[in-house]
Amino acid sequence: MKKTTSKASRMEKVTKTSKGTASTNLSRRKFIVGSAAVAGGGLAIGFQFPFGINPAKAQSNGHAYTEVNAWVVIKPDETCAIRIARSEMGQGTLTGLAQLVAEELECNWKNVTTESPTPGQSLARKRVWGEMGTGGSRGIRTSEDYVRRGGAAARIMLLQAAADGWKVPVSEVTVSDGVITHAASKRMTTYGKVAAAAGKLPAPDPKSITLKDPKSWKIAGKPMKRLDTAEKLNGDLVYAIDLKLPGMMCAAIKDCPVFGGKLVSYDEATVAHRPGVRRVVRVNDTTVAVVADTWWHAKTALDALPIVWNEGPNASRTSAMIADQLKEGLTASSAYAHRREGDALKAIGGAAKKIEAVYSTPFLAHATMEPMNCTVKVTADRAEVWVPTQNGEAALAALSEESGLPLEKCEVYKHPLGGGFGRRGGAQDYVRQATAIAKQFPGVPIKLIWSREEDMTHDFYRPISQCRLAAGLDDSGRLVALHVRVSGQSINAFLNSPAAKDGNDDRQLQGWYEKPGDAQLGYTVPNLLIEYAMRNTHVPVGPWRGVNTNQNAVYMECFMDEVAHAAGADPLEFRRALMKDHPKHLAVLNAVAEKAGWGTPLPAGVHRGIAQFMGYGSYSAAVAEVSVSDQGKLKIHRMVLALNCGHAVNPDQIAAQVEGSVAYGLAATLYGECTVDKGRMVEQNFDSYQIMRIDEMPKVETVIVPTYDFWGGVGEPTICVVAPSVLNAIYAATGKPVRDLPLKNVKLV
């Protein structure tokens, strides 16, 4: 066991027909297929390994350097530029993937830098870098094998080039930190000196490459410093929202405030003579924009623009109506039975003790620090976008479709993201909008920036849901049956309807799967029934960091405490009795209990709560320590979290990700809620959608429990255990279970 304490869309749905776009050899539809269906927007299309390709020549400060293969470029000064296809949004994927490549490359980590290939470059080279989607905590775990093989292949080619130059068998040549040695003749050289020759050699068969045993890693698996920190601190890093291009104009945008409504008209003459205004633009059937010389001129003119909306049939919808819709689903006569083992209803009916509860969780916004934005330039034969996106290929497809130009005449320049959390994945609505505007200003770069209000009220929200649970205990307090019914909105129904046919949407039951691998339920119950009643609303939904494990963990883990209480059992011991068939779940539960000192005395008034869950291929558990004052004021003192993600590529980054999960999860637990009135979202900015303040952040301790036998995610898994561990600690403190979020609406005493 390794312990660390860290340093301190609304998208227009993909249509079935092209919008009069030019034909291309590669269908845009096929190119983007599945992007919106996967958490965070990852594609699932096959690709060729980056081997057997012609090396490319490039220039750096007037000097030529050589691409050894698609992943590795060696420069004359011994710099090893490692190409990273995934998006960096603060999670550390850039550094982690570079570590994996560098480990197999055997270069000097001090010489490592990174480059980002564009989706257009990848497409031109038969998608040599594979899919570029970054979401679902898959940035490392779904690309680790081929990026490591890319690094190993480059090492093999560099060693062979040195051996050929010395006319010795390659088996006599070794390398360490990028220095190649032939011990018998005491000759030495460096990667930079043989790179040109290596780039001319045939690439080895990737299947013939034996990768290193992770237990022997020297670069990967170590707490290397992040490669992107310095330029964030010194201001060199250019986020897309800060981009400046010659001749650029700025656009501010407004969409119909009610989802499903339409734009009727606007009075351009009212704002046409305001400072800097160039034009008012109809973007699509629901959206209008003002283009000006600065964004502030565009935004203030837009605020003054008289607009007539047809708010449509949803203009009377409210949160109360949506709650009633979900409540009906909890007792409806029919629902999709995701798991049916034994006869749970019969067993509960005949049980010695029966426990029931209904829980609810609200819509949540992503609230990224950097609101949606991008810059687009369109000419007669070229379309380019500078964009913070989690899915460069989805952005490329959206740009191509909206501009009417074939994919090969489009390009995407990815910028680091000022927050993603799933919002910038498959949903590329802001790219489509900016492209539609830029088409009306040929050859002029148009930077579109959403206001915070637009960002908050036109999100793809985390789905709202309610859950009814019932359990049966026998005379000895053993759990003999469990029935779960979720009623709520489906992400797939909105973004990927074929995956939610007839209401059969397994995705909404994430964390309760039977099979191991991604999000398995960690308990064995003799009689089990898990159901889903799809109840969709007019509010668009999409992936939100952790997606459905967050809601489902609250339902399962808080109810598990209620059942343990009814059985007169310690919550930890009650869980352990149900986890004998789930050793990895049990291991993280035991690890977090040990680290937190479960069962040991606490200061007066402080109480503990525990939870465990699985998501994104990783096993998580948490213990929260809280106090509740006589006036009902909650203080969260300490949180301990355990994670088994299989292989731990960078322990410091894992600890940082866990801390981020706690901050994001606690903000949602304490305050997060998006409500509906008159068909529109009520919360428009941080004055009404509160984010947790730094003085509310508890001490966070991370326990990494690697088993080195699988690749799991890191960015999302631990969020799901944050809320239930806190709620269970509140239950221990007050004797009353908390069944509804956020806590700002709950009286604790």
Image (tube, helix red, strand yellow):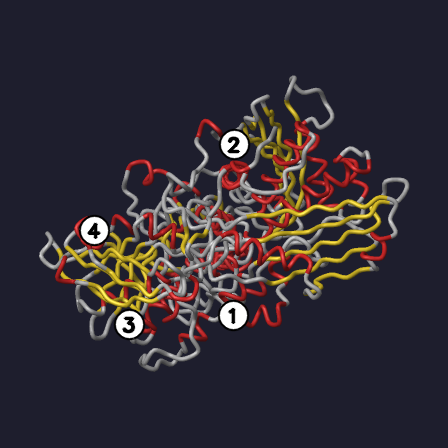
Left or right, residue 233 beside residue 13 = left
- Disc 4 crowd, CA 10 A, few/some/many (<14, 14-19, 20+): many
Q: Amino acid at mark 3?
A: Ser
Residues at circles 4 and 2 in contact by the CB criterion of under 8 Å: no
Q: Amino acid at mark 1?
A: Gly
- What distance separates the C-alpha of mark 2 from that of mark 1? 37 Å
- What distance separates the C-alpha of mark 1 from that of mark 4? 41 Å
Residue 685, compared with residue 432, is above or below; it is above
Report the residue marked by disc 1. Answer: 46
From the image, state whether disc 4 or disc 2 is nearer to you: 4
- What distance separates the C-alpha of mark 3 from that of mark 1? 26 Å
Report the residue marked by disc 3. Answer: 403
Report the residue marked by disc 4. Answer: 295
Mark 2 falls on what kind of element?
loop
Residues at circles 4 and 3 in contact by the CB criterion of under 8 Å: no
The tally of labels here is 4
Dot placed on the residue nearer the N-terminal end, 4 or 2: 2
> In the picture, which quadrant includes the C terminus?
top right
Residue 219 visible in the shown view: yes
The image position of residue 167, as x and y in percent, is 46, 59
* Residue 272 sits in quarter: bottom left
